[in-house]
Image: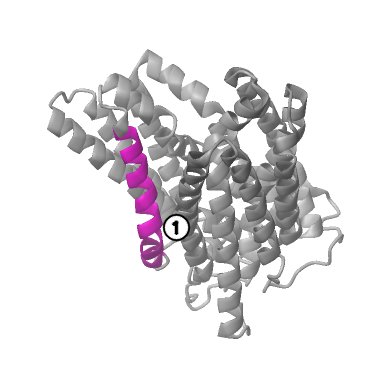
Amino acid sequence: MRGKPASVLTSVRVKYMAGMVVDATGSGMYLPLSLLYFHHVTGLPLTQVGAIVTTAAVIGLVSNPVAGVLIDRFSARAVLVGGYVLRASAFCTYPLVDNGVAVFAVVLPVALGDTSYPPAIQSFVAEIVQGTARDKLLALQRSLRNAGLGMGGLLAGAALALDESGFYVVVFGAAAGYLLSAALLSTIRPTAPARQPGARVSRKGGYLLVARNRPFLGLTLLNIPTAFGYTVLSVALPVYVTRELDAPVSLVGVLFAVNTVGIAVLQVPVTRILVRYRRTRAVALGAGVFALSFVMFAVLGSVSTGAALIAGVFTATGAFTAGELLHGATASALVAQAAPEETRGRHLAVYQLSWAVPIALAPTVLTALLSLSSLAMWLLLAAATAGSALGVLRLERVLPQAAVHPVRPVPSEGEPAVSPTGSTGKVA
């Protein structure tokens, strides 16, 4: 970002955020209807459609390391734009589907594109902005993506209210969103020095370097409990609120809206405050607040009064949202800076597994725990996320200091300065 005119940086941010809003709006149109669409156009049972979509998602998960290699070899922008075009092409073939084999053939490219997206977008952000600007851009991204997803859902509802052709409007609208996002992001040039496409990044090979980076692997493993915590809102909370607390089903939608609106409205101002402090402290605080919210949910099981119960549910959901605000954008910035530039794609592909695996396992694990004991589930989640918070604090001294500090601290007399790449000189 050094040496770049302010107008150029503003243009980059505007193009980037426009791409994210369009992407999120298209995704928001399709995501709520993904299973229903194929059930509607093929007549296949929902259980069969679900099995096909899950199989494609697992294959996409297994292919995640390939995305890291492609990012390091060809650039994050190439993988990001390629993933958009791949998914858009698949969506354009959705109306031709009429059997289970065809369903698998069109959802697999979408799953592969979805899998490549998280490490590609994090690597891309790391290339176009630095320092506190990275935290702020990621915060704005989370805020606007939440708004875009909500807008997409409203557009999908409006399309389906017309007639059955609304299903086709939805899939073509999602395809158009991906293509427009690809067009916008393809015009953004990285501000950091880039490697030549196709250049070898390491003579020793890719993922061996990740395996030797113990602080980064520690950060990845510590994210798993927190990632499980994120899934609570969509997996465990609806069942808990309606079955265990005997609250109306309509409350689930209201709680989801509280969380979504809270992130959309507060993420940017909260992150502007957090950039004054160490990223590790903000991430640990976020995980700690998650733990507190899970304890609150556990206590609600013993509350029987209607008004007190409703107030407690909203308070716990507010605490959960606060944990997201503290953790989300800052954790992404911390990880992107902690990954060495030469193998950033591979590192972030490995880190993405700490999200993908909990998301895949959460429906089975959390519902099984709920069936055994809801109190045990909440306390186990609380203990795990609290342990994650403490672990991140312990890692603080071995992570690259440029990753820990959004604003690089002035070194004391006799203390070596942190290099621009964030290396501390320590061998991971």
* Residue positioned most to the top: 372
37 above or below 212? above
Q: Is residue 322 left or right of residue 46?
A: left
Does residue 396 appear in this view? no
Q: Which residue is mark 1?
A: 143
Query: Which secondary structure type mostly characterizes the magenta part of the structure?
Result: helix
Q: Is residue 248 left or right of residue 366?
A: left
Residue at image point 61% right, 24% down: 50
Q: Is residue 94 left or right of residue 217?
A: right
Residue 265 painted magenta: yes
Task: Determine the secondary structure under disc 1.
Answer: helix
Residue 30 position by quadrant: top right
Give the color scheme: rainbow, by chain, secondary structure or one colour.
one colour
Residue 120 position by quadrant: bottom right
Residue 66, position as x, y percentages in the image: 77, 43
109 above or below 361? below
Residue 286 painted magenta: no
The one nearer the camera, 273 or 98, is 98
Q: Is residue 287 left or right of residue 247?
A: right
**Which amino acid is tagged 1?**
Ser
Does residue 294 appear in this view? yes
- What range of the chain is rendered magenta? 251-274
Residue 415, position as x, y percentages in the image: 53, 73
